[in-house]
Image (cartoon, grey):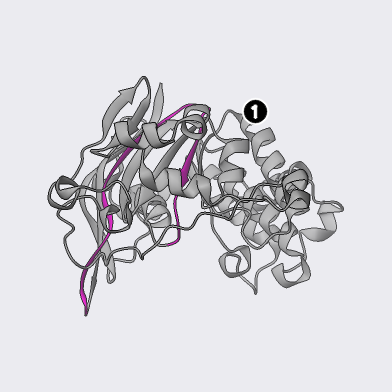
C-alpha cells in the first residue's frame, strides 16, 4: 500500500533570467515501510522535489505549477497553509541537509524538540520535554538530560545530525524525507547515522525518501532508486536491478564514475581510469525539446535531440526514459 503518491510534479522558480524548471514532471510512489532513494548530481531537482512535497517553496521565489502529491488520500497541493502545517513535522517529517543552519542557534536542543511535540500532540511542556529526552536517548546521545539544556554550537556535527533526526521522528511520522543526511560527516559518523535511520525504520515502520548523490549510501540503505537529471526522472528500478543493469546512459555514467578499491590492479599498474561524464548540465531556464542528457550522451541520435523520451517499463519494475536502451545494454 502506498503512503505517498507523486504524479507529474512540476515546480518552477521565477527569476530575472527567466523561468527555472527545477522539477519538470516527476512521478514516484512510496510504499509503507519502504526506503526509496532519489539520486543525481547537484542541481538535478532532488531537494526541490522534497521541499515541494512539504510545500516549503518560498512563494515569492517559486511555486508548484502542476502535478499531484497525495498522502493518505489527501491532495497536499490543495491544502490550506494551516492544514499543511498540521501534516508537516507530524505525519511527514524532513531531515535537512545542513543541521547547523537548520537548528535555531539561540534555542536549546530540548526546546527545539519539545516545541514540535507540544505543537502536534497537544501535550504539556513537561511531557514534551520528557519525549525530547526519550528521543535523544533513542538516537544515541549520551547524558541526554544535560544535553536538553545545551545549544547547537556545543554539539559536534554528528550529534547535531542526531538531534535533527530526533526532531523529525519525535511525533512518529509515517514518512521521513532525508535530504543528504550524511553530507559533511566523516565516514564513521556517516555509517552510524545510516544504521540509526535503518533501525528507526524497523522500530516505527516509517517509510523513508533518501535523497543523496552518494551511490554507496543508495546501495546500502534503499530498496528502490529513482535517478534524476535536469529536473526529470530518467530511470527507476529496485536497487539490485539498477546496479546490475543500468539502462539510462546517465545512470551508467554515474556507475562508471565510482572509485573501486583494487589493490592488485594498483600494484600491477593496470588500475582503470575513472570515467567522466563530459559536458555540463543544460540550462533549466530554456525548454528542452528532447532528452536533457542528449548533448552529453555517447548514444544520442537525432531523435534524442528532437523528441522527449517517455518513461517506459523495459523489465518488470524497471523503467527508463531513453530511446536507445537496447544499445546501452549491449555496450554494458
The x and y percentages for residue 75 are: 27, 39
The stretch drawn in magenta includes residue 24: yes
Q: How many marks?
A: 1
Say which residue appears at 65% left-offset and 69% top-offset: 107
Of residue 252 and residue 39, the one placed in the foreground of this image is 252
- Residue 321 lies in quadrant: top left
The x and y percentages for residue 319 are: 33, 31
According to the picture, the residue beneath numbered tag 1 turns out to be 202
Q: Which residues are magenta?
A: 17-42
The x and y percentages for residue 295 are: 27, 58
Label 1 SS: helix
Say which residue appears at 84% left-offset and 59% top-offset: 146
- Residue 249 lies in quadrant: top left
Is residue 19 at all visible to an observer of this figure? Answer: yes
Q: Is residue 217 left or right of residue 286?
A: right
Label 1: few (<14), some or many (≥20) within 10 Å? few
Say which residue appears at 33% left-offset and 43% top-offset: 234
Of residue 85 and residue 262, the one placed in the foreground of this image is 262
Extreme residue in the bottom direction: 16
Amino acid at each position: 500500500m502506498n503512503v505517498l503518491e507523486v504524479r507529474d510534479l512540476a515546480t518552477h522558480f521565477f527569476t530575472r533570467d527567466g523561468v527555472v524548471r527545477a522539477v519538470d514532471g516527476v512521478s514516484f510512489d512510496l510504499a509503507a515501510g519502504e526506503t526509496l532513494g532519489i539520486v543525481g548530481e547537484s542541481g538535478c531537482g532532488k531537494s526541490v522535489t522534497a521541499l515541494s512535497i512539504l510545500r516549503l517553496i518560498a512563494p515569492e521565489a517559486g511555486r508548484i505549477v502542476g502535478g499531484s502529491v497525495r498522502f493518505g488520500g489527501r491532495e497536499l497541493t490543495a491544502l490550506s497553509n494551516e492544514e499543511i502545517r498540521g501534516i508537516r513535522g507530524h505525519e511527514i517529517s524532513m531531515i535537512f541537509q545542513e543541521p547547523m543552519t537548520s537548528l535555531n542557534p539561540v534555542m536549546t536542543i530540548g526546546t527545539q524538540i519539545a516545541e514540535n511535540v507540544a505543537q502536534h500532540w497537544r501535550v504539556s511542556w513537561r511531557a514534551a520535554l520528557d519525549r525530547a529526552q526519550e528521543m535523544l536517548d533513542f538516537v544515541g546521545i549520551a547524558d541526554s538530560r544535560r544535553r536538553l539544556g545545551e545549544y547547537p554550537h556545543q554539539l559536534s556535527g554528528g550529534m547535531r545530525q542526531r538531534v535533527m533526526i530526533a526532531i523529525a521522528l519525535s511525533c512518529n511520522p509515517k514518512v521521513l524525507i532525508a535530504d543528504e543526511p550524511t553530507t559533511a560527516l566523516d565516514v564513521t559518523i556517516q555509517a552510524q547515522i545510516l544504521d540509526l535511520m535503518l533501525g528507526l525504520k524497523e522500530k516505527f515502520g516509517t517509510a523513508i525518501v533518501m535523497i543523496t548523490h552518494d551511490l554507496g549510501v543508495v546501495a546500502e540503505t534503499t530498496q528502490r532508486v529513482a535517478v534524476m537529471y535536469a529536473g526529470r526522472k530518467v530511470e527507476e528500478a529496485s536497487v539490485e536491478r539498477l546496479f546490475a543493469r543500468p539502462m539510462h546512459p546517465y545512470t551508467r555514467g554515474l556507475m562508471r564514475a565510482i572509485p573501486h578499491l583494487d589493490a592488485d590492479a594498483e600494484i600491477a599498474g593496470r588500475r582503470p581510469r575513472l570515467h567522466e561524464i563530459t559536458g555540463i548540465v543544460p540550462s533549466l531556464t530554456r525548454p528542452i525539446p528532447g532528452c536533457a542528457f542528449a548533448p552529453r550522451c555517447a548514444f544520442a541520435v537525432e531523435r534524442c535531440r528532437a523528441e522527449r523520451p517517455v518513461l517506459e517499463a523495459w523489465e518488470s519494475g524497471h523503467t527508463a526514459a531513453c530511446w536507445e536502451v537496447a544499445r546501452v545494454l549491449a555496450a554494458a
